[in-house]
Amino acid sequence: MDYKGRERMFLRELSERNRRVREYLCSKRYRERFPLAHIHDSAYSYIESGGKSLRPAVLLFSCGALGGDEEKAMPAACGVEIFHTWTLVHDDIIDDDSKRRGKPTVHEEFSRRIVEESGLDEEAARHYGLSIGILAGDVQHGWATSLFTELATENGIRPEVALYLIDEMNNYVLNILVSGELLDIQYSKQSVDSLTEEAIVDMLWKKTGVLYEFAGRAGAMIGLNSCEPDHKAVKAISSFCSKCGTAFQLQDDILGIVGDEDKLGKPVGSDIREGKRTTIVYYAFENATQAQKRRLLEILGNKNASAEEITWAKELLLELGGVERTKALAERYITDAMVHLNDIPESTYKELLSTWAEYMINREL
C-alpha cells in the first residue's frame, strides 16, 4: 500500500480513537465534577472544539503494539489528552493568543463572556479571563492525574504501573515541558546569533517531544502491564515517539509560516509576531545579509507588525532556505525514529505507528 493509502487508513483509525476519547471524557461522571458553569465550560472548551487526539492515539497504538488491550489503556489515553490540553490553555495565556482551533482561546472567551454577563470594564474583564484560564488549567491538571489512577482502580493494571506513570508525568514530563516553555520565552528575547541549532531543537523537544515520548512509554508499559521502563520494547517505543514528537514541532513551525490559516485555526505568522526563535529563523539568519537581519529583527517580536511586514518576513524566511532546511531536519528525525521500530513485532499497530511518523511531517494542520 502506498503512503496515501496508509494515510487514509491511519486517519480512519485516528478518528475512531478521537471519538472514543471525547466520548469517555464527556461522560456524565466527569461533567458533574465541575458544578460552576465557568469552570465546567472552560475545562471542556478545547475538548469540545476539536483536536486530533494524536497523543492519546499514540498511547493506544503503543499499547496494542506490545499486545495490550486498548480499552484498559483508555483512562491513560484520556489523561494524556487532558494533560496536553491544560498546557495549551496556559500556553495561550503566555503567548497572548486569541484563537485556538478556529475559536476564541479560553482566556479570550471568558473575557468576552463576563462582559456579556456582568458588564465588567475591559481591564477587569481581561483579568477575569486570564484568571479563568489559569484555573481551568489547574483543574485539568488534577483531572489528568485522576484519570491515571483508574488504570489500577478500574482496569486491572498493576498499581505500581499506574503510580510510576503518575510520578513520571507530574515530575519528569512536567518539569521538562515547563523548562521548554521558559526557554522558548527566554530565547525570544535573545539575539538569534547567540543561539545554536542544537539549543533550539532541544527546546522544541522539551516543549513537545517529551509528552509524545511519555505517551509511547505509558502505552508500552500498560500493554505489558509491567513496571519496566528499561524493557527493550518500552525503550524502543519511547525513543521512536520522542523523535517523532520533535519532528511534529518542526512541522508545526513550518505550518506557522506557510500553512493554511483556515485549516490551522489560528493566525499564520503569529510565531513571527511573538519573536519565536525557530530553526526556520536560525537557518534564515545564517544566509541573510546584515540589512535583511536588521529588517527581520524589527519585525520579529513586534506584536503590532503590519500584515505587509509579516508577509515580507515570511517570504524572506522561505527565500533564505529556513523552511526548506527545517523540513529536511524533520525528515531526518523521522528516518532516525523508524530504526527503533525494528525492535517491535510486526502488527497492524506497528504499521499505524509507522504511518503516524510519516504523517507528522506531511500533515497540513
Image: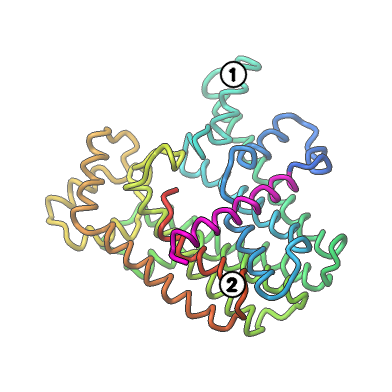
Q: Would you place residue 347 above or below residue 41 in this image?
A: below
Q: Is residue 203 visible?
A: no
**Left or right position of 239 against 76:** left
Residue type at mark 2?
Lys
x and y percentages locating residue 180 in the rendered image: 49, 60
Residue at the location (78% across, 37% down)?
Answer: 34
Q: Secondary structure at mark 2?
A: helix
Q: Classify residue 130 by image quadrant.
A: top right
Tally of numbered discs: 2
Q: Secondary structure at mark 1?
A: helix
Q: What's the mark number on residue 115?
A: 1
Query: Which residue is label 2 attached to?
Result: 350
Residue at the location (76% across, 78% down)?
Answer: 226
* Magenta residue span: 1-25
**Left or right position of 254 against 175:** left
Residue at the location (74% across, 29% down)?
Answer: 37
Residue type at mark 1?
Val
Residue at the location (69% across, 58% down)?
Answer: 77
x and y percentages locating residue 55 in the rendered image: 60, 58
**Left or right position of 127 against 149:** left
Magenta segment includes 198 = no
Q: Residues within 10 Å of mark 1 (few under 14, many from 20)?
A: some
C-alpha separation, residue under disc 2 versus residue under disc 1: 50 Å
x and y percentages locating residue 83 in the rendered image: 65, 53
- Closest to the camera, between mark 2 and mark 1, is 2
Q: How is the image coloured?
A: rainbow
Q: Would you place residue 51 above or below residue 121 in this image?
A: below
Foreground residue, 365 or 254? 365
Sequence-first disc among 2 and 1: 1
Q: Would you place residue 53 above or below residue 238 in this image?
A: above
Q: Would you say the magenta stretch is mainly helix, strand or loop?
A: helix
Magenta segment includes 23 = yes
